[in-house]
Image (spheres, rainbow, N blue to C red):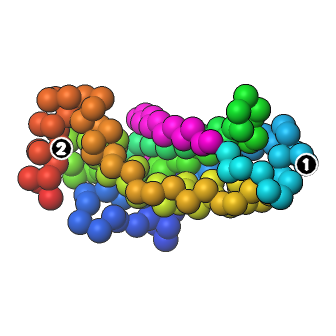
Amino acid sequence: MADTDHQVTTASNLPVMVHAQYVKDISFENPSAPFSLRAGLEAPKLDVNINLDARNLEDPQIKSLYEVVLRVSVRATRGEQTVYIAEVLYGIAASMPNVAEEHHHPLLLVEIPKLAFPFARKVLADLIQDGGYAPLLLGPVDFASMYMSRFGEQGREGLTQVAASN
């Protein structure tokens, strides 16, 4: 990675250093336009999905460097008709040089997505608005609950250990 000391920030009260935030991929499909944009139509039904991916990045200069990608996808429909499909993959490159490796997992899948979500939400809202629709204003996401539902009791132990070390 490039020398980004001026861009590196430490999340408040977290042992995480954010080296970069970026849109990794973005997509918007508007297959029914311009007909789907007529005034007086009922609001579309929305199906929102949020997924996470984390991977280790090899860098000889930065210890414990990871990329976390938050995928936010929306499919809007009226009946059987697709109104629009929007998707944003928002990435964060972050390191945890002073954190024991057994504590990385919950930080990567809970705390870093909490940092990324407001930015991904803004990009998605702007994308949908630029497509001609009202911006989608997503509420907060409980990444800790998502983590717990996916990893169960093992996830609870990881979250407890991270909270105790902060």
Q: Residue at x 39, y 51 (%)?
A: 141
Q: Which residues are magenta?
A: 45-62
- Which numbered disc, 1 or 2, marks the residue closer to the eye? 1
- Of residue 88 and residue 39, the one placed in the foreground of this image is 39
Q: Position of residue 133 (x, y in %)?
A: 74, 56
Q: Position of residue 96 (x, y in %)?
A: 30, 50
| Residue denoted by label 2 | 159
Label 1 neighbour load within 10 Å: few <14, some 14-19, many 20+: few
**Compared to 45, does 13 lie above or below?**
below
Q: Residue at x 68, y 50 (%)?
A: 43
Helix, strand, or loop for circle 2?
helix
Distance (Cα) linking label 1 and label 2: 47 Å
Horizontally, residue 133 falls left or right of residue 9, namely right
Badge 1 element: loop
Taking depth in this image into account, of 79 and 1 the one nearest to the observer is 79
Indicate yes or no whether the magenta region holds residue 47: yes
Q: Residue furthest right?
A: 34
Within-10-Å neighbours for mark 2: few <14, some 14–19, many 20+: many
In front: 64, or 149?
Answer: 149
